[in-house]
Amino acid sequence: MNYISTRGAGAGERHLFSDILLGGLAKDGGLYLPAEYPRVTADELSRWRTLSYADLAFEILSKFAGDIPADDLRELTRRTYTAATYCNVRDDESASQITPLKTLGIEGDTQLSLLELSNGPTLAFKDMAMQLIGNLFEYALAKHGDTLNILGATSGDTGSAAEYAMRGKKGVSVFMLSPHKKMSAFQTAQMYSLQDPNIHNIAVEGVFDDCQDIVKAVSNDHAFKAKHKIGTVNSINWARVVAQVVYYFKGYFAATKSNGERVSFTVPSGNFGNVCAGHIARMMGLPIEKLVVATNENDVLDEFFRTGVYRVRKSAETYHTTSPSMDISKASNFERFVFDLLGRDSARVLQLFRDVEEKGGFDLAASGDFARVQQFGFVSGRSSHADRVDTIRDVFQRYDTMIDTHTADGVKVAREHLQAGIPMIVLETAQPVKFGETIREALLREPERPAAFSGIEALPQRFDVLPADAARVKAYVAEHTGE
Ligand SMILES: *Cc1c(COP(=O)(O)O)cnc(C)c1O
C-alpha cells in the first residue's frame, strides 16, 4: 500500500504506512491518503462478521499497513483491543465486544442505536485509536532504536487519551500543555493523577488558545524540533483515522444479519477525523447508506454539507459550547474528503486550500462537484445547547440511558435523517461523567460515574505550572529530555 499527498507533491515517491506513522502533514502541507482504497470482497465481509474486535482490526489494518509483518500486527491488535482496556464502563460480559451496540428503540420504522466507543481508559472515543497508536509507536521506535517526544495542547479529551496511550511506553515521552485551572475537576484529575515518569503535564497560566500557540511556536522552530525529536499525535495522523475504520465494520455487523442490508451512521464531528473513517469504510465497500455529520453551534461542516460553502471561522467567531470537543474553527481532516469529492484532482485541492489560507474558504455550490456529496452519502445537521439538554432528558426518560453532550448532538441530528428500514447507528463519543454540568442541568442529578473513577479527584496529582511563554516551555522540554 502506497500513500500519496492530497496536494500532489512527491507523486511517484514511495511512502509506506511505517514511513508516515510518526509524521503529520506531507511535505507540501497536504494530508496522506492511500493511493487507492482497498476493496473488501463479499467473502471477506462474510468471514469478518464473526471475528473478535482485535482480529477484525488486524484484517482491516493489514490492508493499509502491509509493510508491518502480519504476526507483529496481529500481536499489536490483540494486545490493544482487550476487554481489560475497554471495560471501564461495563464490567459485564459485553465488555469483551469492545464496542457494544446498544439499541435505544424503534423510531419511525427505524432502529436507533448507540455504538459505544467510550468505554476505554479516558471515557472518550479517542481511546479507540489512541491505544493502538501507543503500541504502534512503541513498536516502530524500538525497530529503529529511536525516541519521540510528543508535544500537544489539550482542553481535555485528546490530551488524556494520548497520555493514557503512551504511559509507560518505551521510547516515547509526552509533554502535554493544558490551561491551568480551566479544566473540570474530573478531567484535571484524569490527566494529572498519572504518575508515569514519561508523562509530563504542563499547566500553562493562560487559556487553551495560549497552549495551542505555544505548540505552534515550538513546532515552527525546526532546529529545536529536530534536536529534541518533537512529534505530535493530532487528529490528522493517518493511523488514527484508519484505526477508527474498524468500528464502522463492527457496528455494521452488530446492527445487521446479512450483508445485503444497509445502515446509516451519525457522527458527532469536530475535526472530521471520526466521520472521515466512516467515509473510508464506505469506499472500501461497507454497505453504508448515509453518513450524517452532526455539529454543534460551530457549524462549519454543517454549512458545507447544506450549501457547498466551506468557510473557516476566526477564533473570535468560535463558540465555547457544552460539547467542547466539537468546538472547532476549521476541520483539519476535511481535506481528505475534498480530495475524493474532486475525483482526486490534487491541483484543485491545492488551489482550494490556498483559498482557505488567503480568503478564508471556498465555494463549491456552483460546480458540479457539490452534487457528488450525495453520491458519497453525506448529509448533516447541527444542534444548540437547548437541543442537547432536551435530547439528554428525552433519551433518559424514554430509554433509561444517560448520554453525554456530544452524543446528544448526534442523536438530535440523527433523528432528522431517519429512513424507514435502515438502522441508524449514532456513534457514542464520550461518557456523561465528563460533562457533569449539562447533565445536572438536564436531569437535575449527578452523572453516572463508572466505579473505576470513584474519588479520582482525591488522588495525588503530578504537574508543573509554567507561564504562557514558548521559551519557558522549550527550556522545560530540553531539561526533561536530558539534552
Ligand atoms: C474529538 C471528539 C469529537 C470530534 O471528533 P472528530 O474526529 O474531531 O470529528 C466528538 N466528541 C468527542 C467527545 C470528542 O472527544
Image: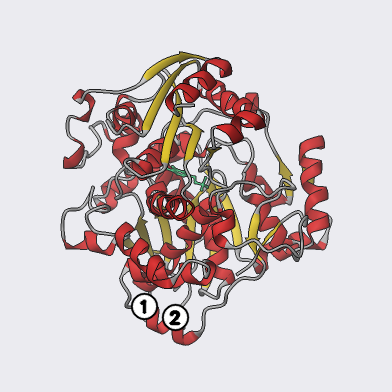
Residue at the disc numbered 2? 45
List x then y, in percent, for residue 329.
Answer: 62, 35
Say which element carries label 2. Answer: helix
User: Which of the colour schemes (rainbow, by chain, secondary structure, one colour) is used?
Assistant: secondary structure
Q: Name the residue at 51% across, 83% down.
A: 41
Residue at the disc numbered 1? 49
Q: Is residue 400 above or below residue 476?
A: below
> Quick check: can you spot residue 357?
yes
Which is more toward the observer, 136 or 443?
136
Which is more toward the observer, 58 or 210?
58
Q: Is residue 65 above or below residue 296?
A: below
Left or right, 111 with respect to 65, comes to left
Q: Are marks 1 and 2 in contact (CB under 8 Å)?
A: yes
Query: Given the image, on which type of amino acid does mark 2 rest?
Result: Leu
Q: Count the marks: how many?
A: 2
List x then y, in percent, for residue 194.
Answer: 29, 32
Query: Given the image, on which type of amino acid does mark 1 rest?
Result: Arg
